[in-house]
Amino acid sequence: MPPARGHPYREGMLELHDVTKRYGERLALDAVSFSVGDGRLTGFVGGNGAGKTTTMRIVLGVLASDGGTVTLDGEPVTATDRRRFGYMPEERGLYPKMRVLEQTVYLARLHGWSTEAATRNAVELLERLGLGERQGDTIESLSLGNQQRAQIAAALVHRPEVLVLDEPFSGLDPMAVETVQAVLADVAATGVPVLFSSHQLDIVERLCDDLVIIANGRIAASGTRDELRTAHGSERWELLTSGDLGWLRERPGIEVADFDGGWAVFEADSDASRQSVLAEAVSRGEVVSFSREHTTLAQIFKEVVR
Amino acid sequence: MSGANRPTAPSFVDSVSLIAGREITMRLRSKAFLISTGVLMLAVLASVVLGSLFGGQSEPTKVAVVGTAADAVADSDALEAVPVDDEAAGEQLLRDGEVDAIVVPEPGAHQGQTVDPLGITVIGLDQTPTGVVQALSVHPSVELLDPAAVDPGLAYLVAFGFGIVFFMSALTFGTTIAQSVVEEKQTRVVEILLSTVSARALLTGKVIGNSVLAFGQILAIAVLAILGLMLTGQKVLLGGLGGSVTWFVVFFAIGFVMLAALFAATAAMVSRSEDIGSVTTPVTMLVMIPYFLVVFFFDDPTVLGIMSYVPFSAPVGMPVRIFLGHAEWWEPIVSLVILVATTALAVAIGERIYRNSLLKTGARVPLAEALRG
């Protein structure tokens, strides 16, 4: 298998190579290529209809692609490999009349686990997700948030080797988000590639090692969080002083982007002019803080999908 | 969560038995299923018991007999003689309702001056006791030039019986399969299932699970009916039915799989349980038409002959013909081969439709699209 464009081949990872999908005339995925490293939490972000769900369905084999390949450890993914994938579809759903534990055990057994081992996994996981008390309740009797936790248990109970989650955090309260985050981080720590999509960019930013941004069926950007921040992040600096920063506007090589009394955000044309600003502020004896402006994922996202 | 002890993927058979097991467990837990089965059982039991109460196979009619009249009554199976000393004692019993009639020797019998050829007189209460008279009458010999092999009434009953068992269980469990397919689609659980097992395993598991339930229910009904007949002392009319029942079971087993696959496939094309009825109508028709044809044409050898080869009506038509003695020995085998081939085709097409429609939620999937994929 030749390396995909821009994605050097690495052992033990999930890779997509030029995956294409058409719905009639519409090109839903246009040569989508990216990789999910083993043990890496990879966030998959994009607007509505950008192609996230289609991509995930193709990875899981529930949808056939019109071109391109999905490989695991360099080999094309087979139906047998996919049995060892964990999946949480965008369209949530479990059997409403089955009990939580029973359902989780059933799914693990479909993956080949014995009843005893499946039960052990399921009980442990449900406890961890805070559903220990609700094991004997039917799915339909749970609140939406708890149904969501049960759904996550369903994706994890067979201890998958690859994990693909479509919007795992939607509908969860902040406490549940914490719990699920911790569980996912643990799974990734065992060497499992984890790909998850989310609209909650702050969570993605906090949790992810790597990022893949998709827009209109094309990969707009991908890489580690820091790489993306370097590539698309701001060159702006933030200065906070106890005095007035009116003098800043007169400095050569400085362009003030935002200003409010003792606070300003500015761009400098060189390191030297930036340093001279700091020196000037220090000499005036009024510096509270001086830092590179923090670029949020939301800002990067808006920039790359534009 | 170490990956060292992950199990290998289960075999097709393992997956199918897990899925079938779930179908059965969930159905047995459903109140609606248990109640409807219970009602069906009660109906069968009630019809058996009521049949014994109103049926003609009751105790022999009791008649009071006086003196030598006992000889005349003793020859009849339908009558039970209650000896009494004289006519007056008999009259007492008759008025009390203990007996239906009194049989007395004709007054002049012992003198050889009889008017009545039998030498007895039957005394009733307020109207002629026809049953008793009938039992004591002398009949001329009867000879039929072209006797019917099977009583037409019994033939109708058998045709009706096969028809209704096939009709009821195919519809009940066909609808159950359809609902189970749509439930998985409607609740979206199908996407998780498909990422784990193949559509073929899912479909096979459903069909087998529901077939087991259908057979179980029919078996329970049959056992209950025969038990009821035996306990209420009715003669079981099963003599001569054995061969056709065996063929019926074989045909039913295969025909049911065919219908189940078609029910599952058509149901997979819709996403809401409200739409099951309309989308499965063509399959329902395939179940209903043979039923009505058998009931209306059980005495027409041509119609029955054609029906016993058409796969959808063969499970009813062929056993009826075997029962009537119309079928040559090779005919059920040929018909069975046709049925098996059609079932294989139906399962192949059904699986295709099923696989192609499962993830298409929303509007009903057009048949052409479901077939093409």
Image: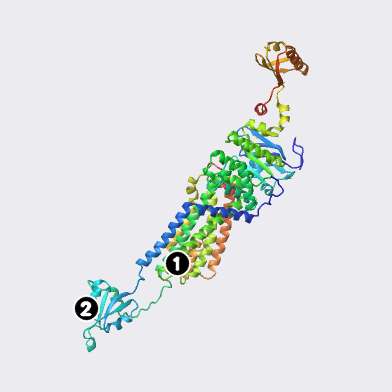
* Colour logic: rainbow
> What is the residue that sits farthest to the right in this orientation?
A272
* Residue on which disc 2 sits: B88
Circle 2: residue type: Ala
Q: What is the CA distance from the residue labelled 1 to the residue labelled 2? A: 45 Å
Q: Can residue A65 be seen in this view?
A: no
Q: Mark 2 lies on which chain?
A: B
Residue at 71 percent of width and 28 percent of height: A229
Residue B45 percent location from the top left of the image: 42, 62
Residue A183, numbered circle: none
Q: Is residue A240 left or right of residue B73?
A: right
Residue at 54 percent of width and 61 percent of height: B253
Q: Is mark 2 on a helix, strand or loop?
A: helix
Crowd band around label 1 with a 10 angstrom C-alpha radius: few (<14), some (14–19), many (20+)? some
Q: Which of A39 and B69 is in front in this view?
A: A39
Q: Nearer the viewer, residue B228 or A53?
A: B228
Numbered disc total: 2
Circle 1: residue type: Leu
Q: What element carries label 1?
A: helix
Q: Is residue A136 left or right of residue A224?
A: left
Residue B103 percent location from the top left of the image: 26, 79
Residue A171 percent location from the top left of the image: 57, 36
Q: Quadrant of the N terminus of chain B?
A: top right
Residue A80 percent location from the top left of the image: 68, 49
* Residue on which disc 1 sits: B227
**Quadrant of residue B335 in the image?**
bottom right
> What is the residue that sits farthest to the front in this orientation?
A133
